[in-house]
Image (cartoon, rainbow, N blue to C red):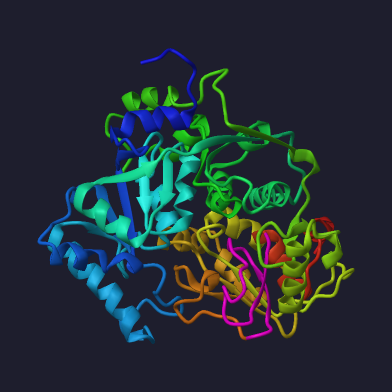
Amino acid sequence: MSDAPRTMFEKIWDRHRVLEREDGQTLLYVDRHLMHDGGAVAFDVLRKRGLKPRAPDRIFTVPDHYVPTDSRRLEDMRDPRHRELVEKLAQNTAEHGIRNFGLGDPNQGIVHVIGPETGLSQPGMVMVCGDSHTSTHGALGALAFGIGSTEVAHVLATQTLWQRKPKTMRITVEGQLGPGVSAKDVILAIIAEIGAAGATGHVIEYAGSAITGLSMEGRLTLCNMSIEAGGRAGMVAPDETTFAYLAGRTYAPEDWEAAVERWRALPSDPGAPFDAEVTLDGGAIEPMVTWGNSPEDALPIGGVVPGPEAGADAERREMMARMLDYMGLTPGTRLDGLPVDRVFIGSCTNSRIEDLRAAAAVARGRKVAEGVEAWVVPGSEPVKRQAEAEGLHEVFRAAGFAWREPGCSMCLGVNGDTAAPGTRVASTSNRNFMGRQGPGARTHLVSPAMAAAAAVSGHFTDVRRLMAETI
């Protein structure tokens, strides 16, 4: 093998390469296959072909997309088709000896939350899941990406996956983040800078002092939205923060010292070439709010809604006009002061304990504004237990927030948790597409602290102003 410096991505790719085809496709070995309730039908595909899962001990499942967040009872699922998916997942995993974190399990939650917190997600792994936000696990130095339903069945049967090798991009964010600025603001600023297609065909490696200064939970938020920049995956090199986070977790390696030694060799070599480089000033990033129907349509809270004439070409101008009409916005409107109807704090982007602490710090001693419906949905049972042990649920309830059960909830709204048409939602999720949170729902992406600030103010506002106030 060449002694040329390699990126972290290349090191992981090379180690998992089984064989290559003449058409450029590479067969990769998969270390962890995560599945949610939407992937339950993949077992039917195997059964019809007379196949069984190749490596049951490397497959882990959890119902999260379709489960109710107002109850833990399967019979409370309103849609019988969704209930069947959850039941089939439990039946199939029991049949094949696969670990299923089902309803009632003390570790049940959103698949991209429970992976890291149980220690299933580890540096150097190739991880896949039938969900685009699998990039989340790259925060621990894994190569993790979402796959389609056909690919889910292929991995289930073979524990391998055909992939075309992507290019590499390094996004460096230097400097110290200011008060009230979180990882969510960093990734929204990045996407606003490079665009929703800016990293298409690339695996992103995030670097720089502002990135290494993030907690593991902040890095998970950052990598979670890599797909929103068009990236195939997002990664952060493992370091002492990573090792401290993983130590002692249920699925952490038994040969811990040997594992850490391997992980220390993963970061990109000095001088390793990237196909693209982007640099941002972390100190210049402010609390962000999206105004349109793509995460790239984001501005600092002090910004104003742009008009279609700001579009770079006719196609973009037409798209902006459609977005403004859908969002019910007028060019020149200040984001600070824009009224909200609903607030959703949750999703695989922002439902971890640090996210809930940040939101509770803003909610404490305040009240949800009249006419606003606000929900907090923990990302997992362990997050919920930890939050309750810290009394965060009481802070939220006293302020007027609903305290829900773990699940994907309003992030994509397939389980009945939706907003009414025309409702303006401050959401900590990752997507703001038309209809994402319900037909006609108007979604604005923000950080947990900014969402809490919107809830208690009744409108979007600069959370730094509330942080400076004494209650």
Query: 145 or 22: which is nearer to us?
Result: 22
Q: How many marks?
A: 0
Would you place residue 222 above or below residue 46 in this image? above
Position in image of residue 170 (x %, y %): 60, 34
Residue 434 part of the magenta-drawn span: yes
Residue 422 lies left or right of residue 413; in this view the side is right
Instruction: Please say whether residue 386 is visible from this viewpoint.
Output: yes
In the figure, residue 442 lies in which quadrant?
Answer: bottom right
In the figure, residue 454 lies in which quadrant?
Answer: bottom right
Residue at 23% from the left image edge and 72% from the top image edge:
88
Query: 420 or 179: which is nearer to us?
Result: 420
Residue at 40% from the left image edge and 63% from the top image edge:
109
Q: Residue furthest front?
A: 22
In the figure, residue 337 lies in which quadrant?
Answer: bottom right
Which quadrant, please, contains the N terminus? top left
Instruction: Please say whether residue 119 is visible from this viewpoint.
Output: no
Position in image of residue 278 (x %, y %): 68, 36
Per the picture, the main secondary structure of the magenta-coloured stretch is loop
Residue 430 lies left or right of residue 372; in this view the side is left
Residue at 69% from the left image edge and 46% from the top image edge:
194
Report the span colored magenta: 421-446
Residue 237 part of the magenta-drawn span: no
